[in-house]
Amino acid sequence: MKTVNIGIIGGGLMGKEAAGAFGRWFTLNDFPVSVALTAVCDLNEQVLEWYKSVPTVKLLTTDYQELLRNPDIDVVYVALPHHLHCKFYLEVLEAGKDLLGEKPFGMGLEDSLAIKAAAEASGRFVRCSSEMPFLPGPQRVIREVQSGRLGQVIEIRAGFLHSSDIDPEKPLNWKRQVKFCGEIGVMGDLGMHVLHVPLRLGWKPKTVYAQLQRIITERPDGKGGRAACDTWNNAILNTTVEIDGHNIPMTLETKRIAPGETNTWYIEVLGTKGGVRYSTKETKTLWTFRLDADDQLWQRTDLGFKGVPFPTVTGGIFEPGFSDCFMQMLAAYVAERAGELKGRFGCVTPQEALESHYVFAAALKSFANQTVEKVTYE
Ligand SMILES: NC(=O)c1ccc[n+]([C@@H]2O[C@H](COP(=O)([O-])OP(=O)(O)OC[C@H]3O[C@@H](n4cnc5c(N)ncnc54)[C@H](O)[C@@H]3O)[C@@H](O)[C@H]2O)c1
């Protein structure tokens, strides 16, 4: 079995999550490709220190070009602050490596266009990270929609909510400043996660009316003073999608200050004959709606681990979590790269990442002008 050698640039929160998934790759049942995390680049020596306990890692460096020059590395996972996405993604491709880039795939539309163009020109295998849809619940939502059991779709609601920013005394970092995470703020942070399933189902917003909020505008700067926190904390995008010739409202929520929420990803699709609803708040639960002669019935199905696209040793009745769906996403990347996806759900494509940026760009315009904006995809 061929081993794919992986390098990581940006070894922080998500770099470590990826390392964890690669480290238990052998738990995937009959998976056709093995992987080895062999190199990590980060500017922070303490971060690099953490990777010394990963047995497959041969190169730890603060110089990303050293990693890119290494001929043994096949795929680079880049998990860097958003202002670095475009530069690093392009350099990974120029170095002849395949790329898994973190969302939002650039600071804004311009970056995303450049990344997609470079991906096409390079011929390399390029995908964008978004893991939640790999859980069994979202997979079942997709199947329900595709089954036709919902009848005519009436309404779609999807969102990603957490409260990482609810504490006003939490110090400022790159995630809370426009210069590092772009004008799109929370939409860049959470929007790709929310749009992954709708875009895959062919639901591309035609119009958007955006409500954007800056709620906490100043924070400790970590040096004893205070500094401006200028990102959008929360965004509600009221969009319209066309399904079977009908204009359907689709509401997309992305919130970094959502009281009571930690990492709640949800989707609900209602139709004339049925409905389906899933939220990570009830990780194991799928809700499906149907009508019978007398009643309107919401039925609760207890899901287990069964239904992940890439089965593992984990028992079918056990519950999945964040690290599981992240590993499933990495498995989808590696399988698709090897031509082994076999109809299973795949990672976000550069085209889908670009489409999300068209929506966010129109949302910024909508909020600035207080208008309903057409979303144009060129
Ligand atoms: N898929 C998800 O669920 C998810 C969750 C959180 C973050 N993210 C995304 O992952 C990316 C990284 O976020 P994070 O939370 O891991 O951030 P982080 O701040 O924890 O990690 C970023 C790392 O990059 C390093 N770094 C910064 N500049 C560098 C440079 N020039 N060269 C090498 N290393 C450098 C930093 O030292 C840090 O260790 C972002 O795009 C973010 O949106 C995705």
Image (tube, grey):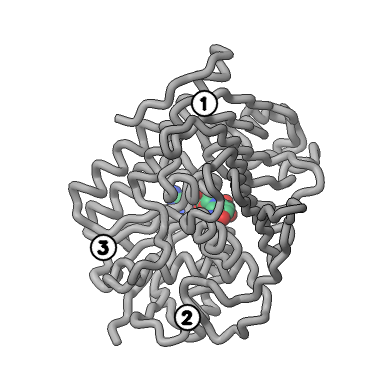
Crowd around label 1: few <14 · some 14–19 · many ≥20 (10 Å): many
Residue that numbered label 2 is attached to: 25
Amino acid residing under circle 3: Arg
Residue at 53%, 47% in the rendered image: 151
Contact, mark 2 vs mark 3 (Cβ under 8 Å): no
Residue at 66%, 62% in the rendered image: 286
Which is closer to the viewer, label 2 or label 3? 2
Q: Secondary structure at mark 2?
A: helix
Of the numbered discs in the image, which one, if any, rests on residue 69? Answer: 3
Q: Secondary structure at mark 3?
A: helix
Q: Is mark 1 within 8 Å of ligand 1?
A: no
Crowd around label 3: few <14 · some 14–19 · many ≥20 (10 Å): few
Of the numbered discs in the image, which one, if any, rests on residue 114? Answer: none
Amino acid residing under circle 1: Val
| Inter-mark Cα distance, 2 to 1 | 41 Å
Residue 251, picture quadrant: top right
Which is closer to the viewer, label 2 or label 1? 1
Q: Secondary structure at mark 1?
A: strand
